[in-house]
Image (spheres, helix red, strand yellow):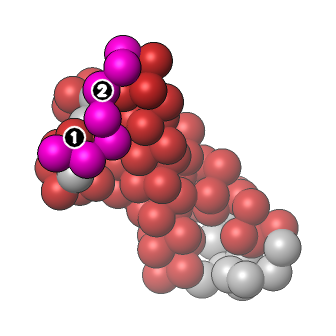
Amino acid sequence: MSTLVQILVSLISGGVGGNIAGALLKQFSLGPVGNTIVGLIGGGLGGQLLTAIGLVPSSNIVGDVAGSGVGGAILMVIVGLIKNAMAGKPSTT
């Protein structure tokens, strides 16, 4: 799989992962646009990180999708936690 396709898959999967996490964890949600943007960043970083450390082979699209989706979700939750802490909101509902 070409590098451009891998990057696009990672970004799209990350955006989807960020939005799924935002829907499931409403207390950390940044809104649809925020979830997507943070998910894109997390997906791009997560996919590249997992490939770089060898957890996902570079030609495995299923691994790219899973790693990027999880990366997007994790970064969305982290940013949501930081946003809530700065706003003085409790981390649980």
Judged by its main secondary structure, the magenta piece is loop
Crowd rating for badge 1 (residues with CA inside 10 Å; few <14, some 14–19, many 20+): some
Image spot of residue 36 (x, y percent)? 34, 36
> In this rendering, does residue 17 appear at all?
yes
Q: Residue at x 62, y 61 (%)?
A: 47
Can you tell which mark lies on residue 89? 2
Question: Viewed as shown, does residue 38 lie left or right of 32?
Answer: right
In the picture, measured across the screen, residue 93 lies left or right of residue 34, that is left
Give the number of the disc on residue 27. Answer: 1
Q: Earlier in the sequence, mark 1 or mark 2?
A: 1
The quarter of the picture where residue 48 lies is: bottom right
Q: CA distance from mark 1 to mark 2?
A: 9 Å
Residue 20 figure quarter? bottom left
Q: Is there CB contact under 8 Å for labels 1 and 2?
A: yes
The disc labelled 2 sits on which kind of residue? Lys
Q: Which labelled disc corresponds to residue 47?
A: none
Q: Identify whether 53 is placed above or below 38.
A: below
Nearest to the observer: residue 79 or residue 17: 79
Mark 1 secondary-structure assignment: helix
Residue at 63%, 71% (x, y): give it.
1
Residue at disc 2, secondary structure: loop
Q: Which residues are magenta?
A: 87-93
Q: Of residues 88 and 46, which is closer to you in this image?
A: 88
Q: Say which quarter of the image contains residue 37.
A: top left
Q: Nearer the viewer, residue 82 or 39?
A: 82
